[in-house]
Image (tube, grey):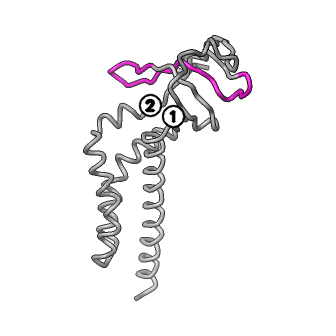
Amino acid sequence: MNRNGHNAEKMKKYGSIALNGIFILTILLFVLDTQTPIDIKSQPIKSFTYYGFLVLTPIVLFWNLWVFKSLKSKLLGSALPVLAAVWIYIIGPMKIVFSSSAWRTQKVIYQNEHLSSKKIEFQMQDVGAFGYNRRTVEVTYLTDLFMIVRPAEIDVDENDDWVRIDQEVNELELKFP
């Protein structure tokens, strides 16, 4: 094999590793956001996750079928993209697109007296032409990018751990310089 052929094979190998790695990352983030109490708070990361999941699935499937040489490699390389494609079909691509907006805090109603990252918030999610989803939830911020979300307690007023603060945040408000 000449030097150019060797370089092309090397580029395919590293391209496959990078493409499949990014695809696996989007799947892990998608599963984390949809199947666990952890929500993605950052809109760029959530958009990357949801749109990456939709767009990368067929790209990775066709790439792996084209690049891998042996039948065993083709089957192994196409298993995860095929499962992802079936999952997309079951959920529905439009539902995934409309869920790609991050939840935005409108009002912090209560804050935990002992843990400042734990709050009860009223949040809204922009779902495009369908308006907004609304929820009141107990949130524990892991970082600025991720949060753990639980249903809000019903008897918060009777609990000494919570302090009512009624702070307007309105993260949905457009900010112009």
User: Can you give x and y, in whole percent of width and height, for residue 150 in the image?
Assistant: 52, 29
Horizontally, is 72 left or right of 25 in the view?
left
- Which residue is disc 2 drawn over? 101
What is the C-alpha distance between the residues marked 2 and 1? 7 Å
Residue in the image at 34% along x and 53% along y: 57
Residue 54 pos. (x, y %): 35, 46
The quadrant in which residue 139 appears is top right
Residue 26 % position (x, y): 45, 50
| The magenta stretch spans residue 143 | no
Residue highlighted by disc 1: 43
Q: Residues within 10 Å of mark 1 (few under 14, many from 20)?
A: some
State which quadrant residue 143 falls in: top right
Q: Earlier in the sequence, mark 2 or mark 1?
A: 1
Q: Are marks 2 and 1 in contact (CB under 8 Å)?
A: yes
Given residues 14 and 1, the one toward you in this image is 14
In the rendered view, tell whether residue 24 sits above or below residue 116. below
Q: List x then y, in percent, for residue 71.
A: 27, 76
Q: Which residues are magenta?
A: 113-134
Residue 143 is labelled as none
